[in-house]
């Protein structure tokens, strides 16, 4: 039915606005939802990554030990009876271990069976006894219950990483060994304990003996030097470029190049380090010194860029105030501008250092990939760093290294989180002091 | 903005006709730019920012124990001129200054003159209070310390106290000298900045709209202070407030588009301006 057509009432602005309002709010809701979804997705992936690494790695913080009554046989350890530390250190503790194991299982006599029996404990077990005998010579001649480190495969079996259900041929551990282990377990002679060795040992071919102490020390020495090289240089360069240098084509060119350097792939810095520092200047390879030189070069542009931004954010009124009472430009910078820019500079430096901490590619080029068992004691000892250690372990075939790789990643991530947290806190704490 | 500019330009041309009838130049300054006992003598000062000329052939004396107020519409060059007087313009890229500016007979733009000691002699107070984000004590002590004006802690303490007293701030802050200067109110901050400036005992104090960020009460306090400071220092003040110029100054200079249009006794400028532009400005017809 048609109604009489009336002249359309003039539409008021409020009606037009109301008509479009729903659509506008819907658009806003969509945008908010997408933003929240993006953040949630990102968090989910981070959570998955952390959960995966943690699940794989947490078992590495425990280590299987086997309790063995060890008779510290004076005839083997100290036949001369002098208790001379040198003689004690040189004694054949492997024989002591073997004898103790035999005593634990008197029924095992066959040669191949004996070899399996000895293989239950780690190759590091004799060293355990050695250090005991050296520290407390009183144990010699007595029988002590000692918790010896279990071999890597035993450790894996106890932790459930090796499947008993597999046919023997596909397993790294024999049925007869499992039988022996089960007997030990029934006696309560098998136990998982906190793996202090993981934090105090250097790396090793044996997963149960491998630790991150060497890599941590190497990382520490490298990062200290990196900070020493790149921080003063970077802040100084930023200060000069930002506050003193004339603004002309040359400084523009320098700025472009600094920004370029920040984007150069890190492996290129490694090649540069190899060619310049090692081959030309003869800096010893594989050392924290040369690693720090390379990482310092790599961090430098990051620090320069962050420092310049921080200096730029200091209000010009502070500079005017200082100049106005007759401070020289250098005094103005060092007394007023730099302290105010410091939180920003520190934030940039920490982020740069965090990047250096996680870097492995350039270090491969300068020999920090070497297999180094000893914990480095200084800046010129051969060393490796945590990310390279992770790379090396990830490459090792033993099952035991899988969990250790993940555990080392956990430690590395822990340090990264700490550093980035420090950067955020620093920024929060000193934000807008003027 | 553009209409205003064109109006001003039209005004200028109108005035120039009147001016020419009187036999003066448009860019020439009406009134006496000299003063009997000058601290600073400026002649033929031109300033460029890049290609743009901000000040055209300005000459002005800044006398002892007197306040010179510089007034004029925004962008007229009064702040630029003020910043020439202690070479603060040096810090601006592309700023070029020509002409003669003398402090006690010494050419300050001479190549041999170091701007650092110059700024100790010609202090400056800025538009926005800009205390250092340090303690009140440190704010005042900073200048004397870098110049080595005192020999002992006691002397420095005394200097800080007298400076704060001169700035009329001592009674308000004497119990909290170690607290940050940025925690004071706007008016107190500005007085702290004045104390900081006079702590190095300058000969001339330049003030660039020192009250524009303050409320009327704080403004009144600062104006009173300026009047007291006049007894010891030569003061040049840039202000947007004509009432303020009338209240605190003995001489007034009116700037317009880079020209110094008219200079004279403050009374005369406000009661009997010679130039049409000056009259239009002080009667509030533009600006």
Image (cartoon, coloured by chain):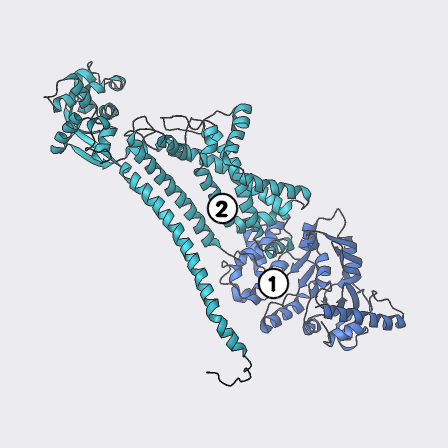
Q: Give the left or right position of residue A398, taking residue A187 as reference.
A: right
Instruction: Please state the horizontal and vertical placement of residue A71, each as a whole percent of the image.
Output: 15, 22
Q: Quadrant of residue B19?
A: bottom right
Residue nearer the viewer, A209 or A77: A209
| Rendered position, B230 above or below A201 | below
Residue under mark 2: which chain is it in? A
Q: Of discs 2 and 1, which sits in the foreground? A: 2
Residue at mark 1: B128
Q: In this view, does A87 lie above or below B96?
A: above
Furthest residue in direction left, as rendered: A107
Residues at discs 2 and 1 both on one chain: no
Residues B243 and A216: in front is A216
What residue is at 60 percent from the left and 73 percent from the top?
Answer: B216
Q: Residue A294, how many percent across, how many down?
A: 51, 33
Mark 1 is surrounded, within 10 Å at the Cα level, by few (under 14), some (14 to 19) or many (20 or more) other residues, namely some
**Residue B104 showing in the rendered view:** no
* Residue B180 sits above or below residue A175 on the image: below
Kind of element beneath mark 2: helix
Secondary structure under tag 1 reads loop
Instruction: Give the distance between the C-alpha atoms of the residues marked 2 and 1, in whole angstroms.
Output: 29 Å
Identified at 89% across, 72% down, the residue is: B22
Q: In this view, does A248 lie above or below A14?
A: above
User: Would you say B17 lies left or right of A263 here?
Assistant: right
Q: Are marks 2 and 1 in contact (CB under 8 Å)?
A: no
Question: What letter labels the chain drawn in blue?
Answer: B
Q: Where is residue B177 in the image (x, y as percent from the top left)?
A: 51, 60
Q: Which one of the lettered chains is coloured cyan?
A: A
Per the rendering, the mark at residue A346 is 2
Is residue A175 visible in the rendered structure shown here? yes
Q: Position of residue A214 (x, y in %)?
A: 37, 31
Q: Residue under mark 1: which chain is it in? A: B
């Amino acid at each position: 039915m048609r109604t009489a057509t009336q002249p359309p009432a003039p539409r008021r602005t409020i009606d037009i606005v109301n008509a479009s309002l729903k659509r506008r709010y819907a658009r806003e809701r969509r945008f908010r939802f997408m933003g929240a979804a993006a953040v949630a997705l990102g968090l989910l992936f981070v959570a998955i990554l952390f959960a995966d690494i943690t699940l794989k790695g947490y078992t590495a913080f425990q280590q299987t030990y086997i309790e063995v009554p060890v008779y510290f046989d004076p005839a083997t350890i100290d036949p001369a009876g002098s208790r001379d530390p040198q003689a004690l250190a040189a004694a054949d503790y492997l024989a002591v271990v073997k004898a103790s194991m035999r005593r634990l299982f008197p029924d095992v006599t066959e040669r191949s069976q004996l070899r399996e029996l000895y293989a239950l404990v780690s190759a590091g077990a004799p060293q355990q006894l050695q250090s005991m005998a050296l520290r407390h010579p009183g144990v010699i001649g007595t029988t002590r219950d000692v918790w010896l480190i279990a071999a890597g495969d035993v450790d894996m079996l106890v932790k459930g990483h090796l499947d008993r259900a597999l046919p023997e041929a596909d397993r790294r551990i024999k049925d007869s060994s499992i039988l022996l282990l089960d007997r030990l377990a029934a006696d309560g002679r098998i136990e998982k304990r906190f793996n202090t060795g993981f934090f105090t040992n250097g790396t090793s071919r044996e997963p149960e003996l491998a630790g991150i102490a060497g890599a941590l020390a190497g990382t520490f020495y490298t990062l200290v030097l990196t900070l020493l090289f790149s921080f003063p240089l970077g802040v100084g360069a930023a200060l000069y470029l930002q506050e003193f240098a004339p603004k002309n084509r040359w400084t523009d060119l320098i700025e472009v190049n600094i920004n370029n350097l920040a984007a150069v792939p890190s492996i290129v810095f490694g090649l540069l380090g190899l060619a310049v520092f090692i081959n030309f200047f003869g800096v010893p390879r594989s050392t924290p010194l040369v690693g720090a030189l390379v990482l310092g070069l790599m961090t430098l542009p990051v620090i320069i860029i962050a420092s310049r931004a921080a200096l730029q954010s200091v209000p010009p009124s502070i500079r005017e105030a200082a100049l106005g009472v007759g401070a020289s430009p250098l005094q103005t910078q060092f007394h007023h501008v730099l302290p105010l820019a410091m939180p920003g500079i520190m934030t940039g430096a920490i982020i740069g250092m965090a990047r250096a901490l996680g870097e492995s590619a350039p270090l491969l080029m300068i020999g920090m990939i070497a297999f180094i068992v000893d914990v480095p004691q200084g800046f010129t000892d051969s060393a490796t760093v945590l990310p390279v250690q992770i790379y090396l372990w990830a490459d090792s075939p033993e099952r035991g290294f899988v969990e250790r790789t993940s555990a080392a990643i956990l430690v590395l991530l822990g340090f990264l989180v700490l550093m980035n947290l420090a950067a955020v806190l620093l920024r929060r704490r000193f934000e807008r002091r003027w | 903005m553009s209409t205003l500019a064109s109006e001003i330009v039209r005004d200028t041309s109108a005035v120039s006709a009147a001016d020419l009838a009187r036999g003066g130049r448009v860019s020439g300054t009406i009134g006496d730019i000299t003063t009997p006992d000058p601290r600073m003598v400026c002649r033929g000062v031109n300033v460029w920012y890049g290609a743009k000329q901000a000040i055209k052939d300005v000459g002005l004396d800044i006398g002892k124990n007197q306040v010179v107020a510089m007034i004029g519409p925004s962008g007229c060059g009064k702040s630029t001129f003020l910043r020439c007087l202690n070479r603060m313009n040096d810090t601006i890229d592309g700023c070029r200054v020509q002409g003669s500016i003398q402090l006690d007979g010494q050419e300050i733009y001479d190549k041999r003159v170091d701007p650092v000691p110059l700024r100790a002699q010609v202090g400056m107070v800025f538009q926005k209070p800009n205390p250092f984000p340090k303690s009140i004590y440190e704010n005042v002590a900073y200048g004397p310390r870098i110049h080595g004006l005192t020999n002992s802690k006691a002397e420095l303490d005394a200097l800080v106290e007298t400076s704060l007293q001169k700035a009329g701030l001592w009674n308000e802050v004497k119990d909290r000298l170690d607290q940050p200067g940025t925690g004071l109110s706007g008016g107190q901050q500005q007085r702290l900045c004045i104390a900081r400036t006079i702590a190095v005992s300058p000969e001339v104090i330049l003030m660039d709209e020192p009250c524009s960020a303050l409320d009327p009460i704080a403004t009144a306090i600062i104006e009173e202070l300026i009047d007291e400071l006049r007894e010891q220092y030569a003061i040049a003040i840039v202000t947007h407030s004509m009432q303020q110029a009338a209240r605190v100054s003995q001489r007034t200079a009116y700037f317009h588009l880079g020209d110094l249009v008219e200079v004279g006794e403050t009374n005369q400028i406000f009661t009997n301006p010679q130039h049409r532009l000056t009259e239009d400005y002080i009667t509030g017809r533009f600006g």
